[in-house]
Image: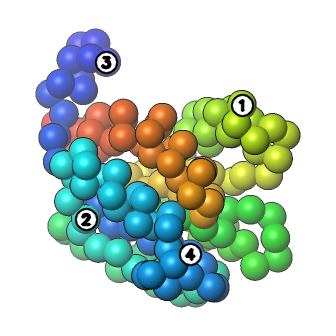
């Protein structure tokens, strides 16, 4: 079956849990989380949950455990905490939880970011894969990075990813 055929037969509606990792944002100032939710809604993907966690590994992991255990969730999209600053801990938590890594996601994201922002793109630790039967994607927290990842990578493939994972 071709990629186009896989995509056509894939699930049409992906239930997504959105997590923002930030020490400073709340629901009114979380432009990146709101962008993710808006873009998902525009494509017909319901939001199964939305939360903001402090950049504390224990909080991030507890929230990911909750989202990944929810039968009403097909995919989890996290934004924030993927850089190299001392408080950036999302990557370490996400990478421990991944059963299968999609290395190409981070590679392509960094390439597309490089075209946009130059060499600073190498500091992104965006990652994706599967965890406990769900798609798990981790993005930088900037609105530009979120928009780039959603429009160029996630929205074109999320149905296909979940369908492949669920064997449908």
Check the image and name the residue furthest to the front.
Answer: 28
Cα–Cα span, label 1 and label 2: 30 Å
Question: Tag 1: Cα neighbours inside 10 Å, few (<14), some, or many (≥20)?
Answer: few
Provide residue 53's location: percent of width, then percent of height: 52, 83
Residue 91, can we see it? no
Q: Residue at x 48, y 54 (%)?
A: 137
Question: Tag 2: Cα neighbours inside 10 Å, few (<14), some, or many (≥20)?
Answer: many
Which mark sits nearer the N-terminus, 4 or 2? 4
CB within 8 Å, label 3 to label 1: no
Residue 47: image tag: 2
Q: Height in image: 146 above or below 161?
A: below
Q: Residue at x 74, y 62 (%)?
A: 83
Judge depth for marks 4 and 3 and give the one in front: 4
CB within 8 Å, label 1 to label 4: no
Q: Height in image: 56 above or below 138?
A: below
State the image quarter where residue 150 is shown: top left
Q: Residue at x 18, y 67 (%)?
A: 72
Q: Please, what secondary structure does the residue beneath circle 2 have?
A: strand
Q: Label 3: which residue?
A: 3
Q: Please, what secondary structure does the residue beneath circle 3 have?
A: helix
Residue 115: image tag: 1
Judge depth for marks 1 and 2 and give the one in front: 1
Residue 21: image tag: 4
Cα–Cα span, label 3 and label 1: 26 Å
Cα–Cα span, label 1 and label 4: 25 Å
Q: Residue at x 24, y 68 (%)?
A: 48
């Amino acid at each position: 079956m071709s990629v186009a055929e896989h995509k056509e037969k894939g699930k049409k509606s992906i239930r997504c849990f959105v997590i923002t990792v930030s020490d400073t944002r709340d629901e009114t100032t979380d432009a990146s989380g709101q962008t993710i939710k808006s873009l998902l809604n525009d494509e017909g993907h319901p939001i199964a949950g939305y939360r903001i966690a402090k950049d504390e590994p224990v909080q991030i992991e507890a929230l990911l455990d909750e989202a990944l255990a929810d039968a009403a969730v097909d995919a989890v999209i996290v934004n924030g905490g993927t850089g190299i600053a001392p408080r950036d801990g999302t990557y370490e938590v996400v990478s421990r939880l991944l059963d299968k890594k999609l290395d190409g996601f981070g590679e392509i994201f960094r390439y597309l970011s490089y075209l946009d922002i130059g060499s600073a793109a190498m500091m992104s630790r965006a990652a994706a894969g599967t965890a406990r039967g769900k798609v798990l994607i981790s993005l930088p927290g900037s609105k530009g990075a979120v928009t780039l990842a959603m429009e160029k990578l996630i929205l074109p493939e999320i149905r296909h990813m979940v369908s492949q994972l669920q064997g449908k």
